[in-house]
Amino acid sequence: MNRRVFLTTLTGSLLAAPLAAEAQQTGKPARIGRLSPSLPETDAPLLDAFRKGLHELGWIEGQTFTIEDRFAEGKPDRLPKLAADLVRQRVDVILAGSHPSALAAKDATVTIPVVMVTTADPVAGGLVANFARPAGNLTGVTGLGQVLSAKRLEVLKGAVPRLSHVAVLTNPASAYTGPFLKEREGIARELGLQLRVLEADAPERLKTAFAVMARERARALMVLTDIMFITHRRAIVKLAARHRLPAVYGEREYVNDGGLMCYGANLEDMYRRAAFYVDRILKGARPSDLPIEQPTKFDLVINLKTAKALGLTIPPSLLQRADQVIE
């Protein structure tokens, strides 16, 4: 899909963005509600990228916009209540990070525009009707994270010689698990891998999942995207190191905390693009007229210190493809 964005100036009644219109007419700073599933410290780089995107478009924090933060702190069941609170606060637009956040915002309001940043498929996940004309009050950017699972396994296979058995850590409650399970047989066949899917739907079940990996002699690990996993990523990274499992992740945070490698859409770039959507909506565009974008920037990050600890030599060809190498 091309990164085309149709810009529409509203005339008449602004049904999709009444609060945004009111803010613009009165000259008050626009109020942006930030709905995040993460901890504040995890979210900070993404929110900074969003702020930078707004500043590049001429917005000044404190003068022309303010941000109301709501963090679920790794507990997705808190998102509906937080979304409802933002609606009560009458924010002009909601910036929803992750599929569960976007879903909570959608359930909370049909009038306040919602700009989502998610790596799940928003169509398959029931958030919007289609990419070109989302309909309703949601639009934004998607990384289509589940589509990248095959690419992550390919990268992992390139790092581990003669790799055949890979454990895949999933949370059955995650929006990313179902699409992967549908595609796993084709992915395994294409890459010549045996994939063992293991579930952990709570932090206390992570050790059990890794014990099964050890018992079944998995040679490597892929961790699917999940809010709970990201929140407890340090524990996952330590368990992978303890069991000497080379692992690939979808998010950079794992590698920053000692994980071996990650491959995925550049989330900071996606949040800068989200600023474009917020800008257009606050200036009168309807979410339904703003097609959903897919990312154009992807990152492969490799931690050589971790590779050395695992006794793993990363092939030069793979290192040359990396966007960042941590030494």
Image: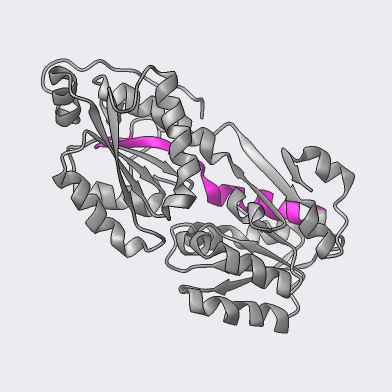
Find residue 61 and report its horizontal and vertical position in percent: 33, 27
Q: Residue 136 lies in magenta, yes or no?
A: yes
Count of marks, rendered view: 0
Residue at 26% across, 47% down: 106
* Residue 324 visible from this viewpoint: yes
Give the vertical position of 194 relative to 122 (above or below): below
In-image side of 316 versus 13 (left or right): right
Q: Nearer the viewer, residue 202 or 179?
A: 202
Q: Position of residue 43 (x, y in %)?
A: 45, 47
Which residue occupies 46% across, 28% down?
52
Q: Quadrant of residue 300?
A: top right
**Left or right relative to 228: residue 154:** right
The residue at the far front in this view is 62
Q: Is residue 316 magenta?
A: no
Question: Quick check: can you spot residue 290?
Answer: no
Q: Which residues are drawn in magenta? A: 134-158
Most extreme residue toward the bottom is 215
Q: In the image, is residue 303 above or below residue 206? A: above
Q: Residue at x 40, y 29 (%)?
A: 275
The location of residue 47, given as percent across then percent down, is: 43, 39
- Which quarter of the picture shows residue 81? bottom left
User: In the shown orientation, is residue 256 left or right of residue 231?
Assistant: right
Residue found at x 25% / y 15%: 9
- Tell which of 154 and 88 is nearer to you: 88
Q: Quadrant of residue 278?
A: top left
Residue 5, position as x, y percentages in the image: 41, 22
Q: How is the image coloured?
A: one colour
Position of 192 compared to 17: left or right?
A: right
